[in-house]
Amino acid sequence: MAAISELKIFSPIFNNSNTQTQYCNFHYTLKFQTENFHSKTPFFRSSNLVSRTQQWRPCLVAEVVDSPPSDDSEQNPDEETASTAAAVAAEEKKDRRKAVKIAWEKLVRWSRSLRSKSKPDVLQRTKKVVVLGGGSFGTAMAAHVANRKAEMEVSMLVRDPHVCQSINQNHLNCKYFPNHKLPKNLIATTDAKSALQGADFCLHAVPVQFTAAFLESIVDYVDPGLPFISLSKGLELNTLRMMSQIIPQALKNPRQPFVALSGPSFALELMSKLPTALVVASRDKKLANQVQQLLASERLRINTSSDVTGVEIAGALKNVLAIAAGIVEGMDLGNNSMAALVAQGCSEIRWLAKKMGAKSATLTGLSGTGDIMLTCFVKLSRNRTVGVRLGSGERLEDILSSMNQVAEGVATAGAVIALAQKYKVKMPVLTAVARIIDNELTPQAAVLELMNLPQVEEV
């Protein structure tokens, strides 16, 4: 073995091919083997340091120290550094896991604390809920409410006697859910008076375009204080009214309690009791909280909001955007086109909604971004299906005649142009959908026009 002397430096210096050097990581230390291991005199003496280093570049600071003889079994410096780094990484991972665990435990404690303080007074007091409309979403919500409390009566007002009989005798909605058993405390009727009598809450699931005429026909049986929870999404074609305007006006009662329910939800998944989250919006905060207590369960989260306009306009226009997304799919334009179109559509909805007084938080929440994602990207969407078939070349009349459910976006698209003009908002994507539906523009021509719009700054 040879003795080692170290020259600790603070910047890289010596550059001589004749020098036997070994560099250690992080220390910038040069180790030199002495010619005589038994000599007690270090290779570098303070007296000869200058003369010995004349052939090398000068250093800023240097110090000579003696080191013990090298050991052939000594760990390689690189291996030692790697081992240390691995130990540090393991410790950091352990700390992160601990921090995540603490954060989760705090969240669970907070949740349990709030649940323990909440009083399910509303559910306990509610004896009867009426559901207007026997469609897929109305049926799914009726089943959900009926499952909340076996002693509660849930009455569905339906038009079709055959569906009414199927629900009462077989506990099935033969038209929409022939394979899903309905709760026994859910009954159906075609008689509006008996359905509405004694109801504590009303779930309104009649399509938007038929709502006014329907409510005017049953106004005599509606209690002025009966809270209406609207499940319908869309705008009335000729008047541009939202459901929060249609229902009180049709019932001739400006003070009729109103709540809008919206969010990403397919009826089939609700019926299958899959986890879902929705939002209820009302200008009456107390009423919104009551509906939250009525509907919220282990499988259905209910958020509350006071932004009725934002919830309704987002829920209406996302159906039109879903048709556009379907057209892109039907034309096989690819994922890039789909992402660009949906992003542009979201901006257009935001521009209009904010002009109408909606809050930004609403548009990025469940009733905005959440519902748009579901409706535009999932095959169960009725409006998206209409778009796919339009993009594939089918005629709108043939598409609608083959469907047993209403695609609200078809009618709502017609209202988009009028709204855009009223609020002076440019909405190229949604307007293009309206023109395609009116058979004034082909999907191919619409794509060409949209792609050739002026290049602008993103807003």
Image (spheres, rainbow, N blue to C red):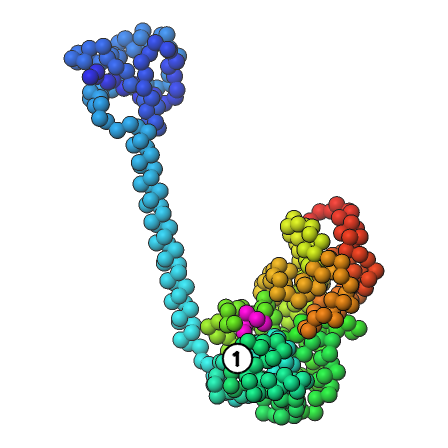
Q: Position of residue 74 (x, y in %)?
A: 23, 27
Mark 1 residue type: Lys
Image coordinates of residue 115 in percent, x first then y, are 42, 74
Q: Is residue 270 magenta?
A: yes
Question: What is the magenta range?
Answer: 267-271
Q: Residue at x 66, y 87 (%)?
A: 161
Q: Kindly identify the residue that appears in the image at 35 percent across and 23 percent down.
A: 28
**305 vs 84, nearest the viewer:** 84
The answer to which quarter of the image holds residue 138 is bottom right
Q: Main secondary structure of the magenta part?
A: helix
Q: How many marks?
A: 1
Q: Residue at image x 39%, y 21%?
A: 11
Residue 427 seen in render: no
Closest to the observer: 221 or 423? 221
Q: Secondary structure at mark 1?
A: loop
Circle 1 is placed at which residue position?
Answer: 181
Residue 363 locus on image (x, y percent): 62, 62
Q: Quadrant of residue 101?
A: bottom left
Residue 441 in the figure: left or right of residue 57: right
Q: Nearer the viewer, residue 400 or 117?
A: 400
Task: Check the picture and name the quadrant holding the N terminus.
Answer: top left
- Camera sees residue 265: yes
| Side of 163 relative to 292 (left or right) | right
Q: Residue 325: image x %, image y %?
A: 68, 58
Question: Which residue is at 78% across, 74% downward?
Answer: 239
Indicate whether 448 appears above or below 303: above
How many neighbours does mark 1 have within 10 angstroms: few (below 14), some (14-19), or many (20 or more)? some
- In this view, 176 is above or below 382: below
Q: Which of the 4 image quadrants contains residue 423?
A: bottom right
Q: Is residue 371 magenta?
A: no
The answer to whether 336 appears left or right of 454 in the picture is left
